[in-house]
Amino acid sequence: MIPAAFEYVRAGSAAEAISLIGEHGEEAKFLAGGHSLLPLMKLRLASPSVLVDIGRVGDLSYIRDAGDHIAIGALTRHMDVETSALLQEHVPLLAHAAGHVGDPQVRHRGTMGGTIAHADPASDLPATTLALGATYVATGPNGSREIAAADFYQGFLESALEPDEMLTEIRVPKMNGAGWSFQKFNRRAQDWAIVGVAAWRGAAGSGVALVNMGSTPVLATSVSAALAGGASVSDAAQLAASEAEPQSDLNASTEYRTHLAKVLVRRALEQASA
Amino acid sequence: MKISVTVNGTVHESDVEPRTLLVHYVRETLGLTGTNVGCDTSSCGACSLHLDGEAVKSCTVLAVQADGAQVTTIEGMATDGEMHPMQKAFMENHGLQCGYCTPGMVMAATSLLKENPNPTEAEVRLGLEGNLCRCTGYHNIVKSVLACAAGE
C-alpha cells in the first residue's frame, strides 16, 4: 500500500513548522514519527496534500524536571519516555504505559506529541496523561497556550488544536509517590487495548482514565468522586463506565467493554491502593 | 526529492517521490530484497531494518525521512563473508522454518540486545512482540536470541 501523492516539506524549527503549516492551510499535516499518520495514509483514510516533516526539530525532544511537573518535548519518542530515569522516578505510570505502546520498533519512531495530537481513544498515552491531569502546550503563529488534558479531546481523532497550531510540550504533574496501575486488555501482545485503564491513587486523591471506551479517552470522574467519598474500591469500580459511551466493534460489544472497564478499574485500583 | 542515505556502509544518492516507503526504496531502488514486506501495516515486523542503529518497521517510514541516516539491512549484517553472531545463532538453533520473518527477526533481535545485552527469556519474547512468525517457530527463535546473548 502506497500513500496518495503529497508534497513534502521539512521544518528545521518549531517556528518554521508553524509558519509552513499556516502557509499550506488545512490540507497540510505535521509528520513526526509517522506511526499514526502513515498507516492512515497508506489505507487512504487520510490524504493530506502537504506533509510538514517536524521529525528533525531537535529542540522539541527533551524530558525536564520543571519543579511540580515534568516537561516533555512533543517530539520525545516513546522509547525515551519509557526509559527516562526522571519519569520512572516522578511519573512512573507514564514511563510504564509508554512501554506498552505498540512494540519496540514502533516505540523507536512514535512520539509523545504525535500520539496526543492524533487523539486516538484507543491509544495508551492520551488516557494516561488524562488520568494524570496533564497540561498540553499548543504553539501557533501568535504564541503558546496551555490546554488541560480534560479539555483537549473533543471527538474521534479530534482535538482542541487549531489547524495552525502545533503541540509542543506535555506537562505531567509529579506523582509524589502515589500508587498507580496500568491495565491493558488485548488479545495479542502488540495490539491496541480492547479496554485499558490508567489509574493513580495517593494523598492528592485519585485519577482514573479509560482507553478505547468511546470516541475520546474518558476520565472516570465518578470513580474518583466515589473514592473521595469513602467508597470501597470494588464499589467505586462499579461506576467505571459512568462517563463512557463504549462502541461495539469486531473485538468487543458495548456490554463486554462496559464489563471489562469495571473489572480492570477494580484491578487497577487494588494495585494502586496496595 | 533528492536524498542521501548510507545503506550498509555505502552512500546512495537518489531522487525519490516523497511517498516512497523506505522498504520499497531498499528493495526496488537499491535491489536489497532481503528485507521482506509482510503485512504492510506495521504489525508483522518482516520489514524491520536498522535506522541509525535501531530497529524500525520500514513499511511505516518514508524514504525521505531516512535522508542523511544510516540504514542497515540484513545484507549488511555479515562482515567479510562471516555471518553476524545473531545469524549464526539462528542457523545453529533452527531459529527459522520458512525463513520469511527471519531477516526482520534478526534485525529486531540485534536491536534488542543492543538495548538489553542480557535479557531473560520473558524479555526476549516481549522484545520481539512486534515480529510475527507464521510458522509459529517462536520457541527456537527465542532460543537463538538467548544463545547469541550468551555468546554461544
Image: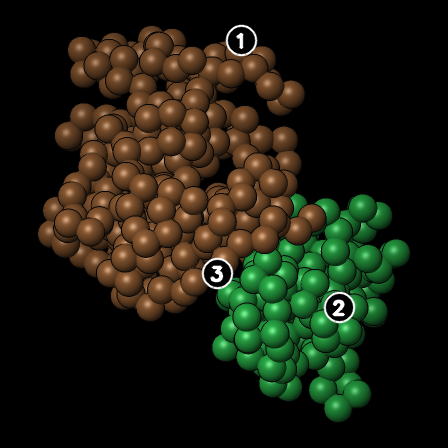
| Residue A60 pos. (x, y %) | 29, 60
* Secondary element at image label 3: strand
Q: Can residue B109 be seen in the rendering of this structure?
A: no
Q: Which residue is mark 3?
A: A8
- Name the front one of labels 2 and 1: 2
- Rounded to the nearest angstrom, the CA distance separating label 3 from label 2 is 21 Å
Q: Which mark is residue B28?
A: 2
Apparent colour of chain A: brown
Write down which chain is painted green. Answer: B
Q: Residue at x 32, y 54 (%)?
A: A23
Give the residue at x 42% y 32%.
A157
* Contact? badges 3 and 2 (CB < 8 Å): no
Q: Residue at x 32, y 41 (%)?
A: A163
Query: Which dot, 1 or 3, sits closer to the camera?
Result: 3
Q: Which residue is mark 1?
A: A255
What is the distance, in whole Å, between disc 1 and disc 3 at their CAs? 44 Å
What amino acid is labelled 2 in the image?
Glu
